[in-house]
Image (spheres, rainbow, N blue to C red):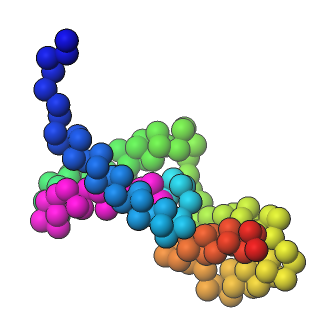
Amino acid sequence: MNEAKPDWDKITEGKIRHGVAVAYIEEGKELTPDNMKDMEKWVQFIIHGYDGIKGMLDKKKAMDDGELKEKVTKVFEGKVVNQSDEDYIKEEIENAVKGLGAQHKNKVMYQMKNGTITLDNLQSCLDRIEVLKKS
């Protein structure tokens, strides 16, 4: 018989994560890497609260350029990322509009070239494009 005690903190964290995931599903959001990161941020916020999260961030030491490059390169599987925001947005939008009807594609591309699509609203634009593809 297993004598190990349950890890109640992990169990609680799992239940909170479940609740956050259900909320995202109810909103019709897809399971994407960006959405998973957002969900995890909410889970940690719910667990630790504002002061706890702020305290953790305040304690983190700033990385020098070499450490930052090493960490980013590791995250992106050895690829050095030096893409500008505009290039990143363009690449994401061009990939997303594949398979979209000409009328909707033209509207999206116009908004991108017009500068209306930014890093701040990119994910919501990508989500909207997916909705347009399904209609």
Residue 86: % across, % down: 62, 72
Instruction: From the viewer's perspective, tell me whether residue 93 is left or right of residue 80.
Output: right
The residue at 49%/70% (across/down) is 27
Judging depth in this view, the residue of 29 and 90 nearest the camera is 29
Tell me the magenta residue range.
35-53
The residue at 71%/65% (across/down) is 96
Instruction: From the viewer's perspective, tell me whether residue 82 is left or right of residue 95.
Output: left
Magenta stretch prevailing secondary structure: helix
Residue 4: % across, % down: 15, 21
The residue at 82%/65% (across/down) is 99
The relative height of residue 27 versus residue 21 in the rendered view (above or below) is below
Q: List the single residue furthest toward the front.
A: 1
| Residue 4 in sight from this viewpoint | yes
The residue at 73%/62% (across/down) is 95
The relative height of residue 74 versus residue 57 in the rendered view (above or below) is above
Image quarter of the C terminus: bottom right
Total count of labels: 0
| Residue 113 in sight from this viewpoint | no
Instruction: From the viewer's perspective, tell me whether residue 86 is left or right of residue 103.
Output: left
Image quarter of the N terminus: top left
Residue 11: % across, % down: 23, 41
Judging depth in this view, the residue of 22 and 37 nearest the camera is 22
Q: Residue 3 occupies which quadrant of the picture?
A: top left
Q: Is residue 71 magenta?
A: no
Residue 107: % across, % down: 76, 85
Q: Is residue 38 magenta?
A: yes
Q: Residue 7 occupies which quadrant of the picture?
A: top left
